Image: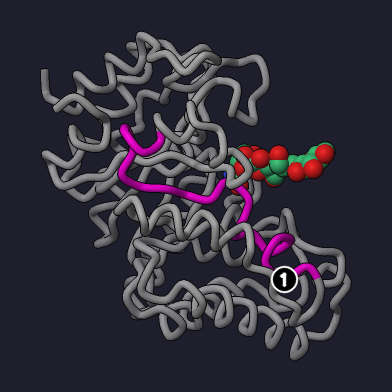
Amino acid sequence: ATTLGAAAAQSGRYFGTAVAGGKLGDSQYTTILNREFNSITAENEMKWDHTEPSRNNFTFGSADRIANHARSQGKQLRGHTLVWHSQLPDWVKAIRDANTLRSVMNNHINTVAGRYRGQIHSWDVVNEAFADGGSGQLRPSVFRDVLGNGFIEEAFRTARTADPGAKLCYNDYSIEDWNSAKTQGVYNLVRDFKSRGVPIDCVGLQAHFGSGGAPGTFQTTIANMAALGVDVQITELDIAQAGSTQYANAVKACLNVQRCTGITTWGIRDSDSWRGSENPLLFDRSGNKKPAYESVLAALNGT
Ligand code: G3I
């Protein structure tokens, strides 16, 4: 196959990208998007600050634009994200009463996931809830501090009702190395949810890598998470300097695990990346395919 999406589809996987709604009028951007990728994640537009800037005042204009583009182009749509401590409006951060926050969180999930019910392939229900470093515990946030650790379970149960057809993912960064306390924290959460019947279908490994690429244990982490009975998705892949070998190895780690079902890069051209001058993506600032593009395509084609 000659495009990333078609090549990934040969093994039943998707190959997606984060999309910034404001760039859909850029014909170079949209040409590459429509040609190469068969899944879309809104880079910012489905986040809480965009969708509910003040309490119970929902604004879906920019998210709808991306959802409509995905639908009209026949692309899968990943939902990103329902509950996250960042890009969270101040009015939510200020809530101190548990009953109020519980009802606000569930109303947000019901309204946002409800609006796109039936259209979302996978939702990042909870994003980045674990602390960095060696604790293996949840990070401080209004959700943890006011509702306790159980906010994650509550969010997943609410999301299941709001959109029963969507796969429900826990998504985080720096959980790619098996030998890290943060990875173990997420693993234990998923194992606990599966053992108690809390609805969870997938783990998203963001995969924002330095120039060395994925850690040597990346495939082990994917396989061990999958063995818990969930899909694994690489949800925000980018690699500083975009080495071809590093990109091919990250993709192969997914292809080697049956339940690793899709890969998303966090942007299209280097100029679209949140990482400034690191040039971590598959297309250069002029929209040309980089060497890493060719190595990823070859890996997806098994050649
Ligand atoms: O749109 C405004 C613009 O009008 C304004 O002039 C400008 C000045 O700061 O800000 C623009 O908004 C920025 C927005 O990106 C759009 O470019 C925000 O400041 C900036 O904070 C925001 O950054 C996003 C970041 O999440 C916020 O946390 C990045 O685009 C986005 O790529 C990044 O994505 C996250 C994932 O959601 C979760 N995982 C990590 C990943 C990378 O940080």
Q: Which residue is drawn at 48% across and 77% down?
A: 159
Q: Quadrant of ligand 1?
A: top right
Q: Residue 95: x percent and y percent?
A: 85, 77
Q: Which residue is drawn at 54% across and 57% down?
A: 65
**Number of numbered discs:** 1
The image quadrant where one finds the N terminus is top left
Q: Residue 31: x percent and y percent?
A: 40, 31
Q: Which residue is drawn at 77% across and 76% down?
A: 146
Amino acid carrying label 1: it is: Glu
Which image quarter: residue 119?
A: bottom left
Query: Can residue 178 be seen by looking at this rendering?
Result: no
Q: Does the magenta stretch include residue 38?
A: yes
Residue that mark 1 sits on: 52
* Chain part drawn in magenta: 33-53
The image quadrant where one finds the C terminus is top left
Query: Can residue 234 be seen by looking at this rendering?
Result: yes
